[in-house]
Amino acid sequence: MTETRLNDRAIIRLSATDGSEDIKAFLQGLVTQDMVVVVDGMPQWSALLSAQGKVLFDFFLWAEGDDILIDCEQAQAEALLKRLKLYRLRRKIEIALDDSIGVHWALAAEERPADPRLPALGYRWLGATGDGEGTDEAYRKHRLSLGVTEGAAELGSDKTLWLECNAAELHGVSFAKGCYVGQENTARMNYRQKVNRRMVIVPLDQADEKRQRAAYPAYGLSVEHRRVEDLHALDLPAWLADAIKRP
């Protein structure tokens, strides 16, 4: 298999410097995902939120023994690294970029871990960094075709509530775990079933520039943050249409 590397991704490794710190326990109070489900070979989509429940960074969590690896946007890696170090305080935890590991993706690689958000998104794994042009363009085109948004360019930073990013439908949040940053507003929205806006992908000729977050002319698509009542006339993917129909 060739050209599987996602070159626009980076890996942040969290490890205990003397074996006395529990990395999962540290992240449990920070991220939206329940760290109990983060086990070797099973990536989980998650986010770090503001206190108001707005997404600052979205990423994938991977377990490697006692270490946790964060598969994040390369352009946001330094900012995420800095934010995590602020929360570390005096804990004996090493938080650093790991340039020896690359993120890989393929649409057909059944022996690899499936993308945790949607089965149709294909397969994702960690491996050697390698060289070459990579498969970022093919991955982005396929992801957008399924109506899945991600990253700062589309979700924004401190602009969008995590549930408005379709995090519940795409398995990026746990409502059973304890407190984490932004949990109060996120849990309240879920309890009241009051997700008033959604991130959606629409044809470029139906774009609303006031709601637009990103445009992809090459694919004829627009990424937008729209009110739910404005979505019913759109041709939404089944997973999102079903979510909007629920009371």
Image (cartoon, rainbow, N blue to C red):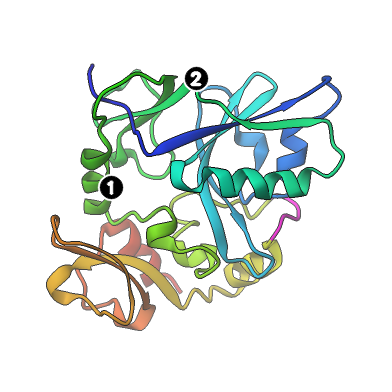
Give the image location of residue 113, x and y in percent. 41, 26
217 drawn magenta: no
Residue found 53% across the figure and 62% down from its top: 162
Q: Is residue 247 above or below residue 107?
A: below
Main SS, magenta region, reads loop
- Residue 231 located left or right of residue 219: right
> What residue did someone put label 2 on?
100
Quarter residue 154 falls in: bottom left
Q: Which mark is residue 143?
A: 1
Say if residue 29 shows up in the picture: no
Q: Amino acid at mark 2?
A: Ser
- Judging from the image, what secondary structure is the residue with disc 2 in? loop
Q: Amino acid at mark 1?
A: Arg
Give the image location of residue 217, x and y in percent. 15, 61
Residues drawn in magenta: 177-181
Q: Which mark is residue 245?
A: none
- Residue 25 located left or right of residue 160: right
Quarter residue 61 falls in: top right
